[in-house]
Image (cartoon, grey):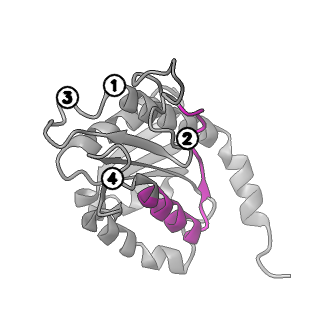
């Protein structure tokens, strides 16, 4: 039974909605065990993260990067980086901003580089771009045309009860489902990777 942890920060509730949509995707895989962890509660959940087969990272995009609260969590993983305790776990990411671009790509790149430094294996979104032709629609999955992870946009004057959009939530659900499916067969691969010598 794969264990998938979703660790996230949400300043105004929009990224929490996105995180819950990711969780809904994970929970579509009956054998998967899911944990939704706000960074405010991470001190009580280090063991959950250490034992997870996959960790999905989520942060709003503030000034072209993760929030300070999420960055604090990232910095707190230094001891795990030192002993490569998260090596060969699956990883993925999602982010939300008020702008259609909002430089969300920079946040997802930051999250993926963080995962790579932990020797994790990154899982991309796995969807074609949506809403990119004359016949496209804002209701398309992946309407913001991301590949590295799930993006969502929430108008600055709307609360989490109405934003992000349904299509952005379904895109996040797709990411959670994709990671959970990948994690379902990951144990054998991970055991093989862990057995590979790191020195010649």
Q: CA distance from mark 4 to mark 1?
A: 19 Å
Q: What kind of element bears circle 3? A: loop
Upstream in sequence: badge 1 or badge 2 = 2
Q: Of the numbered discs in the image, which one, if any, rests on residue 8?
A: 4
Q: Look at mark 2 in the image and give the residue it sits on.
A: 125
Nearest to the observer: residue 52 or residue 58: 58
Q: Position of residue 123 (x, y in %)?
A: 59, 48
Picture quarter with the C terminus: bottom right
Residue stretch rendered in magenta on the structure: 106-129
- Residue 169 lies, in percent from the top left, at 37, 31
Q: Are marks 4 and 3 in contact (CB under 8 Å)?
A: no
Residue at disc 4, secondary structure: strand
Residue 108 position (above or below residue 30): below
Instruction: Please tell me whether mark 4 or mark 3 is closer to you in this view.
Output: 3
Could you tell which of marks 4 and 1 lies nearer the N-terminus?
4
**Label 1 CA crowd tier, 10 Å (few <14, some 14–19, many 20+):** some
Separation of disc 2 and disc 4 at Cα? 17 Å
């Amino acid at each position: 039974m794969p264990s998938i942890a979703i660790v996230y920060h949400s300043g105004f509730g929009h990224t929490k909605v996105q995180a819950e949509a990711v969780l809904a995707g994970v929970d579509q895989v009956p054998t998967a065990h899911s944990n939704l962890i706000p960074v405010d509660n991470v001190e009580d959940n280090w063991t959950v993260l250490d034992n997870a087969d996959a960790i999905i990272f989520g942060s709003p995009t503030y000034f072209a990067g993760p929030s300070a609260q999420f960055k604090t969590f990232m910095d707190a993983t230094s001891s795990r980086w030192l002993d490569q305790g998260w090596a060969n776990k699956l990883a993925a990411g999602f982010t939300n901003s008020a702008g259609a671009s909002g430089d969300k790509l920079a946040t997802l790149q930051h999250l993926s580089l963080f995962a790579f430094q932990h020797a994790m294996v990154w899982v991309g979104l796995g969807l074609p771009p949506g809403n990119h032709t004359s016949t496209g629609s804002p209701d398309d999955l992946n309407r913001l045309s991301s590949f590295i992870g799930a993006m969502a946009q929430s108008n600055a004057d709307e609360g989490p009860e109405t934003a992000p959009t349904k299509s952005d939530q379904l895109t996040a659900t797709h990411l959670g489902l994709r990671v959970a499916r990948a994690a379902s067969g990951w144990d054998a691969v991970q055991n093989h990777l862990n057995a590979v010598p790191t020195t010649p």
